[in-house]
Image (tube, coloured by chain):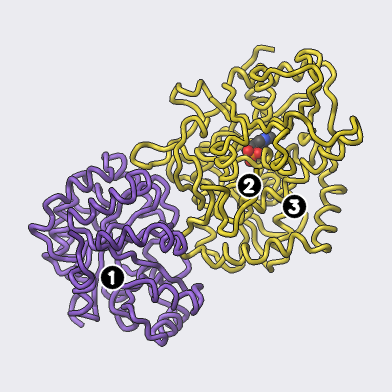
Chain colours: A purple, B yellow
Amino acid sequence: MSLTTTSNRINQLFEQKRERILSVYFSAGFPELNDTKTIIRQLQDSGADIVEIGVPYSDPVADGPTIQDSNTKALKNGMSISLLFEQLKDIRSEVTLPLILMGYINPVLQFGVERFCSKCEEVGIDGLILPDLPMAEYLDEYKETFDKYGLKNVFLITPQTTEARIKMIDENTDGFIYMVSSASITGAKSGISQEQIDYFERVRALNLKNPTLIGFGISNKETFDRACKYSSGAIIGSAFINVLNNSSDIKKDIDGFIKSVKGKV
Amino acid sequence: MKVAVDERGYYGNFGGAYIPEMLYPNVEELKENYLQIIHDPQFQKQFRGLLKDYAGRPTPLYFANRLSEKYSTNIYLKREDLNHTGAHKVNNTIGQILLAQRLGKQKIIAETGAGQHGVATATVCALMGMECIVYMGEVDMARQKPNVERMKILGAEVRPASSGSKTLKDATNEALRHWINNPVDTHYIIGSVVGPHPYPEMVALFQSVISEEIKWQLKEKIDRENPDYVIACVGGGSNAAGAFYHYYENEKVNLVAVEAAGKGVNSGESAATTMLGKPGVLHGSKTLLMQTEDGQVIEPYSISAGLDYPGIGPVHAHLFESGRGKFLSATDEEAMKAGIFLSRLEGIIPAIESAHALAALDQLKFEKDDIVVVNLSGRGDKDLETYIKWGGY
Ligand SMILES: Cc1ncc(COP(=O)(O)O)c(C=O)c1O
């Protein structure tokens, strides 16, 4: 049976909470093939609000070196979509956080769109982020299937996205909007510039119906706090991958990192 | 049959613009402006002027007497190898740099595999005094050293692509990433009929001068515009698209596309995309793509660096699927033999890419009075080392 709108965990989360939401990205199958569940569980225990599970791809064109590298290593470890669904089979017995799969469209096409969505529903996935799935194709060919399996499709906007297009995206979304902080690929940069703040405020002034989360370049408490001033929260990817990459005790290091980012207001 | 791109940027089931939102404004800007710019008489005047005076067009359509005798038919070679920089690639880079100027861009980026497109891009950037960065896979940089140096002499910066398999597809990824990071002042000159719409159609338009010339040259020589066959090699497919363009709708003209079979289609070391690929998305378009069952892109192989690309332009996927194009493949060995054969027979050392098109002559049955045009996309100078290593001459 399909989930109805209100039972989607992304919607539930934003109904309860509209500030300081922390969403964390990692690549499934990295650093070790079978770390997926450990990482998700620990993220929940340490206080993350959303988990974005990266589906590794050989050609991640929107990603910087850190995530390219974690993709490559995950693939080398033997990660695949089928294996990921296998790993996530019982995840809902322990994890209540919204779970989002983030990846590129080609592996989804090969798996089969309907089969993919049906598997997502089966294991309890709430949303998808597919950066190279264009809006027009989504509306024409995918939306119906995503809806059928209760999957929220998350769109990106950037400083270059026009106001008209942001509004169009807002119209066609109900989950959240992924506000890419600068014109760039993923990867931790330092600080948030005035230009970026102008853009955050410009978007806030549009009074969109969807909450926004700011991503790209969020790496620590300072950048997280700043992002939270202009949105419902933020997304951390590359900086978290770096934590995993340098860790000899991932549970402990995940806990330390998430707590340091969320810290005190 | 209608081959033209539709409003959504598709050729039949293939094409589109599968790009992250970060690239949307750039690609949209191109899409909104490219036709108007290209059809502007001032643009055409400048474009045609440079093709003539700078690139050396029209390139000859040469009746290859001895080759024709061997195959008992009438074979013409379209001499794209005589273009400045040694291949058809410059037709596209001249067009795109003029377009970039009209869009107000100051910087140029490009990807390259064998280095031919990189050299053609570095050349027009020197010509126009524009900054040029060319991404090239680390592996390709090592095996195409002379072209790396040519680009540097021309003033371009060559940046190694060290991600993934470190070849053409990764250089393309790096160029796309660079464009994401520099969306406002930079134009990306893609080197083949690949990438998000409108690139495949735009590049095909610039290359269509090839078939435009074939038409009037045949008319002049034999009083008919249409050959029975046009044969071209396919990497991404730009020289083939250019040679086919004005014949798409004339079904009497057989369009033959020749892919690189490497060590054999089923050897595991091949680049024959239509034989080995399945529909998928790469570099912004839906096309046929060599990939694993899990949708990971497979690194292709060919002795010819210009043909080892895991996809093909969406227009070729459509020509293949619809049956309008006939797709053949030639192995390394067949291509090398054909290259040496042409050298001996006609005094023309072809690029190894082009030698694949020549190798297909053995796989077709011609009538005595057939008119066959082979698009000789480039010259063999860049491939001397490969010829030497191969031997057999
Ligand atoms: C001489 C020559 N022919 C053909 C190609 C393949 O490209 P396309 O299929 O776009 O014509 C290349 C690419 O480098 C080339 O250098």
x and y percentages locating residue A28 in the rendered image: 25, 50
Q: Residues within 10 Å of mark 3 (few under 14, many from 20)?
A: many
Task: Tell me whether marks 3 and 1 sit on the same chain.
Answer: no
- Amino acid type of disc 2? Gly
Residue placed under numbered mark 2 in the picture: B191
Instruction: Work out whether residue B241 or residue B270 is closer to the camera in this orientation and state it.
Output: B241
x and y percentages locating residue B274 in the rendered image: 52, 33
The residue that appears at 68% across and 49% down in the rendered structure is B121
User: SS class of the residue under badge 2?
Assistant: loop
Task: Tell me whether marks 1 and 2 sit on the same chain.
Answer: no
Q: Where does ligand 1 appear, by image quarter?
A: top right
Instruction: Measure how far apart labels 1 and 2 are at the Cα level.
Output: 40 Å
- Amino acid type of disc 3? Ile
The residue that appears at 80% across and 35% down in the rendered structure is B226
Instruction: Measure how far apart labels 3 and 1 are at the Cα level.
Output: 46 Å
Report in which chain the residue with disc 3 lies.
B
Mark 2 residue's CB less than 8 Å from ligand 1? yes
Report in which chain the residue with disc 2 lies.
B
User: Taking the image as drawn, is residue A261 in sight?
Assistant: yes
User: Which quadrant of the figure contains the N terminus of chain B?
Assistant: top right
In the image, taking residue A83 as reference, residue B352 lies left or right, namely: right
Instruction: Measure how far apart labels 3 and 2 are at the Cα level.
Output: 11 Å
Residue placed under numbered mark 3 in the picture: B94
Residue placed under numbered mark 1 in the picture: A220
x and y percentages locating residue B160 in the rendered image: 53, 46
User: Which quadrant of the figure contains the C terminus of chain B?
Assistant: top right
User: SS class of the residue under badge 3?
Assistant: helix
The residue that appears at 88% across and 36% down in the rendered structure is B219
